[in-house]
Structure formats: structure tokens, C-alpha cells
Image (cartoon, rainbow, N blue to C red):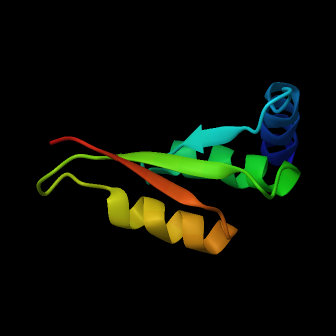
Amino acid sequence: EVFNQLVQRSVLAMNMGDVPLGSFVSGGLDSSLISSFAAGINPNMALFTANVMGKHSEVEMARQLASSLLSRMYWICSI
């Protein structure tokens, strides 16, 4: 419970601005956790991820996170 309070307080302190905010996610635990807390504060937040081609791609995990948070998802792809 203390951990949740600390993370939520930290995310709340950083979740301010005069433009729409977004979050860069890799699909890993840390970016998913922070984005989940941020989406609780700002439900219209967009998520961004980079598509690394090959077996190390985490796009599917990032897509699942966006779906569970009901967030828009944008991919940055290399050519």
C-alpha cells in the first residue's frame, strides 16, 4: 500500500501541463505501471511505443496495455 501511494504521488506531481500529456511505453513492467497510474489521473492520455523489428518487439504487450487502459496507441516505426 505504501508503494502504491508513493508511485501515485510521484505520477500526480509529474502529470501537469498546458498541453495534452502522453506516455512512452515499452510493454515492460515499469512503463506499464507508471502509465496505468497516469491513466487513472488523465484518462484521455495517449500512449506511444517504438516498434523494434524482430523477436525483441514489445509492441503486442504495449497494445494490450493500451487496450486495458482504453487509451489511444501510436507506434513509432523504423524504416
Residue 69, horizontal then vertical, whole percent = 67, 67
Residue 3, horizontal then vertical, whole percent = 78, 42
Residue 29, horizontal then vertical, whole percent = 50, 50
In the depicted view, which residue is nearer to us: 49 or 29?
Answer: 49
- Which image quadrant: the C terminus? top left
Residue most extreme to the left: 54
Q: Is 67 situated above or below 61?
A: below
Q: Is residue 11 left or right of residue 53?
A: right
Residue 27: quadrant of the picture: bottom left
Residue 17, horizontal then vertical, whole percent = 84, 26
Name the residue: 82% across, 33% down. Answer: 15
Name the residue: 88% across, 42% down. Answer: 5
In the depicted view, which residue is nearer to us: 9 or 35?
Answer: 35
Name the residue: 72% across, 50% down. Answer: 45
Name the residue: 48% across, 53% down. Answer: 74
In the depicted view, which residue is nearer to us: 30 or 27?
Answer: 27
Q: Is residue 12 left or right of residue 46?
A: right
In the depicted view, which residue is nearer to us: 66 or 56?
Answer: 66
Q: How many marks?
A: 0
Q: Is 42 situated above or below 11?
A: below
